[in-house]
């Protein structure tokens, strides 16, 4: 069982067993003959009761297998969570009014005992009979001094949790030495213990062509000011600069949102799409739609769909050129469509097909990609995720924002992406669409 599977299994197991513990306590308290009014009070409390125990379990980290690293740790954490959950249940029952007034307070001591036994019992049995399959973290430490030494010791002690310390290099190592070590040992995690002394080196390492590499630093004061630790190993905090792998659950959530959202958006915007198509046809004739090759994830090309907003054969004499402020190739109607991003609506088809996501770096044309890859350090990083219909560069910039500036926004999103950030970008996108900000 993987760490994520254990977490999911633990939550569902506790949902069932916490309620089983309450029913068992009722059975003991009432000798098998539970009064109907007491059962009704329990059923009224069931959702809050369950959530309360789960919240207490989360507070004591009983859903993180790494925190249950010994029998005593398991006993103490689960017992503490059950005690706090029972105290919370007592408060909820008292404050529940008439609906929970019949909840038997005399059953609470029995609930405390049965909840500890049930929540603890299955965990002890699991750790006795089963195992957790940990993702192997093939680690390279870069740095000098006590922190590097302590970190190496801690990682060796945590080998059973997937940590595999394969190499150590001094802080003044060259990028080539590090790259050779990564290749030789098939490293997927690099930890830098002195980021302040090697800031330029760290930047080059993050932007190096190692797509499966996770880079962490042991934060000093500057890093502590601007961020928070993602992992604590022993008592050593680690801040993640870049992760080579986006969690599967996060990719699944994002794809689900893309599919459901694109279907709903196609339905809701159908009248706007019809009006825009008719307006283009009447004002400038065919073609209504514009199909263009763009570069997506892993530098694979696909056809993007948009409403045509430029004159016909706009690039016949010039070849591919980027849109500019006050671009005279844009039609009068096209300027309005761009202002409110209506020209982007056909890209909903690309999102539904999986070429794009709602949120991500804007897909660029292959004609420009080769130059950008040569001229802009780190540009290849943006191809690690799907391109998007909107993103940080779109809500803070516009059609004519320079590629260098757009890349900064793209990397900010790539390294900090989360469902919460996606939601924030979507809200800001609605504000941009309604205001026409950033259009060209």
Image (cartoon, rainbow, N blue to C red):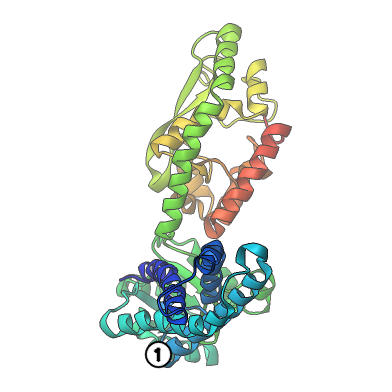
Instruction: Name the one closer to the observer, 280 or 376.
Output: 280
From the viewer's perspective, is residue 256 above or below residue 141?
above
Find residue 388 and report its horizontal and vertical position in percent. Answer: 51, 42
Does residue 381 appear anywhere in the picture? Answer: yes
At mark 1, the secondary structure is: loop
Comparing 216 with 128, the one in front is: 128
Q: Position of residue 101 (x, y in %)?
A: 63, 69
| Residue sticking out furthest to the left | 129
In which quarter of the view is residue 7 placed? bottom left
Residue 154 in the figure: left or right of residue 102: left
Q: Quadrant of the C terminus?
A: top right
Q: Quadrant of the N terminus?
A: bottom left
Identify the residue at horizontal 39%, vertical 48% (top origin).
298
Q: Nearer the viewer, residue 257 or 310?
A: 257
Residue in front for this viewpoint, 97 or 439: 97
- In the figure, residue 292 lies in which quadrant? top left
Residue under label 1, please give it: 70
Check the image and report above or below for 370 versus 13.
above
Q: What residue do we see at 41% from left, 38% from top?
A: 355
Relative height, residue 99 to residue 422 (above, below): below
Residue at coordinates 37% horizontally, 75% vertically from top-left? 137
């Amino acid at each position: 069982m993987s760490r994520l599977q254990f977490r999911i299994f633990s939550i569902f197991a506790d949902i069932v067993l916490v309620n089983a513990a309450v029913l068992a306590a009722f059975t003991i308290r009432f000798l098998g003959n539970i009064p109907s009014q007491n059962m009704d009070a329990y059923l009224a409390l069931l959702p809050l009761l369950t959530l309360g125990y789960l919240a207490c379990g989360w507070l004591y980290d009983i859903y993180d297998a790494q925190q249950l690293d010994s029998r005593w740790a398991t006993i103490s954490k689960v017992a503490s969570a059950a005690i706090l959950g029972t105290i919370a249940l007592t408060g909820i029952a008292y404050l529940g009014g008439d609906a929970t007034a019949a909840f038997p307070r005399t059953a609470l001591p029995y609930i405390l005992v049965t909840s500890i036994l049930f929540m603890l019992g299955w965990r002890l049995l699991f750790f006795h009979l089963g195992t957790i399959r940990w993702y192997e973290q093939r680690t390279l430490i870069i740095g000098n001094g006590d922190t590097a030494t302590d970190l190496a010791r801690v990682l060796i002690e945590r080998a059973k949790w997937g940590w595999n310390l394969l190499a150590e290099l001094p802080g003044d190592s060259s990028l080539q030495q590090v790259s050779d070590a990564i290749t030789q040992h098939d490293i997927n995690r690099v930890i830098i213990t002195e980021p302040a002394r090697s800031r330029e080196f760290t930047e080059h390492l993050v932007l190096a062509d190692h797509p499966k590499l996770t880079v962490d630093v042991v934060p000093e004061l500057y890093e502590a000011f601007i961020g928070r630790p993602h992992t604590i190993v022993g008592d050593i905090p680690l801040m993640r600069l870049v992760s080579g792998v986006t969690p599967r659950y996060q990719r699944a959530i994002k794809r689900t949102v893309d599919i459901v959202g694109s279907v709903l958006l196609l339905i809701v915007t159908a009248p706007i799409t019809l009006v825009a198509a008719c307006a283009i046809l009447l004002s400038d004739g065919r073609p209504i739609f514009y199909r263009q090759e763009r570069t997506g994830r892993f530098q694979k090309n696909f056809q993007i769909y948009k409403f045509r907003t430029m004159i016909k054969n706009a690039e016949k004499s010039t070849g591919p050129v980027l849109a500019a402020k006050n671009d005279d190739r844009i039609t009068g109607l096209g300027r309005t469509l761009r202002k409110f991003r209506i020209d982007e609506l056909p890209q909903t088809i690309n999102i539904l097909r999986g070429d794009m996501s709602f949120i991500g770096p804007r897909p660029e044309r292959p004609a420009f990609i080769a130059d950008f890859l040569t001229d802009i350090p780190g540009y290849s990083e943006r191809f690690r995720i799907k391109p998007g219909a909107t993103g940080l560069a779109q809500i803070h910039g516009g059609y004519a924002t320079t590629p260098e500036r757009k890349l900064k926004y793209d990397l900010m999103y790539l390294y900090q992406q989360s469902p919460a950030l996606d939601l924030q970008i979507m809200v800001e996108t609605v504000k941009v669409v309604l205001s026409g900000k950033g259009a060209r």
